[in-house]
Image (spheres, rainbow, N blue to C red):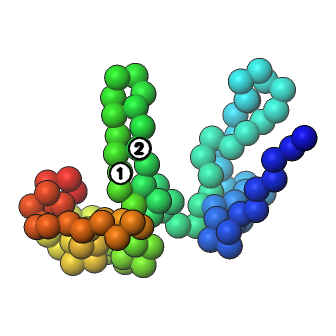
Amino acid sequence: RYTEARMSKIAMEILRDITKDTIDYQDNYDGSEREPVVMPSRFPNLLVNGAAGIAVGMATNIPPHQLGEIIDGVLAVSENKDITIQELMEFIPGPDFPTAGQILGRSGIRKAY
């Protein structure tokens, strides 16, 4: 038996440049194979999809964001390394919850950013 997964078109952008020597590789857990240290994603996957988890007593909870807003924000930061949170929030006003969650007020967003 095997499990097959079909990646969406946007997910393929995570792997598109994997053979172009753009990232480092490391041995896997038993040294039998080489695996990428990071994925050569063409978009900021962590910020777009978010992440949640606990490891070594530390917790993280990064909410998902809208792809276009994140790209605009990344471009703004690359053009102005001294951008303020307030200026950045003009491009990334807040998380984008897929379950249609609502955010009441902006102070919590500013504090999180």
Determine the residue located farthest toward the right in the rendered image: 1
Q: Whole-Å distance between the Cαs marked 2 and 1?
A: 6 Å
In the rendered image, residue 47, in percent from the top left (x then y), is placed at 41, 59
Q: On the image, which quarter does residue 19 sit in?
A: bottom right
At mark 2, the secondary structure is strand
Residue at 68% across, 43% down:
36
In the rendered image, residue 3, in percent from the top left (x then y), is placed at 81, 47
The quarter of the picture where the N terminus appears is top right
How busy is the neighbourhood of tag 2: few (under 14 within 10 Å), some, or many (20 plus)? few
* 34 vs 62, nearest the viewer: 62
In the rendered image, residue 20, in percent from the top left (x then y), is placed at 75, 60
Q: Could you tell me if residue 23 is visible in this image?
A: yes
The quarter of the picture where the C terminus appears is bottom left
In the rendered image, residue 13, in percent from the top left (x then y), is placed at 65, 67
Q: Is residue 88 left or right of residue 11?
A: left
Q: On the image, which quarter does residue 17 sit in?
A: bottom right
Q: Is residue 99 above or below residue 68?
A: above
Q: Which residue is mark 1?
A: 62
In the rendered structure, find residue 52 and report the number of the disc placed on it.
2
Going by the numbered disc 1, the residue's amino acid type is: Ile
Q: Could you tell me if residue 20 is visible in this image?
A: no
| Labelled pair 2, 1 in contact (Cβ < 8 Å) | yes
Residue at 71% across, 63% down:
7
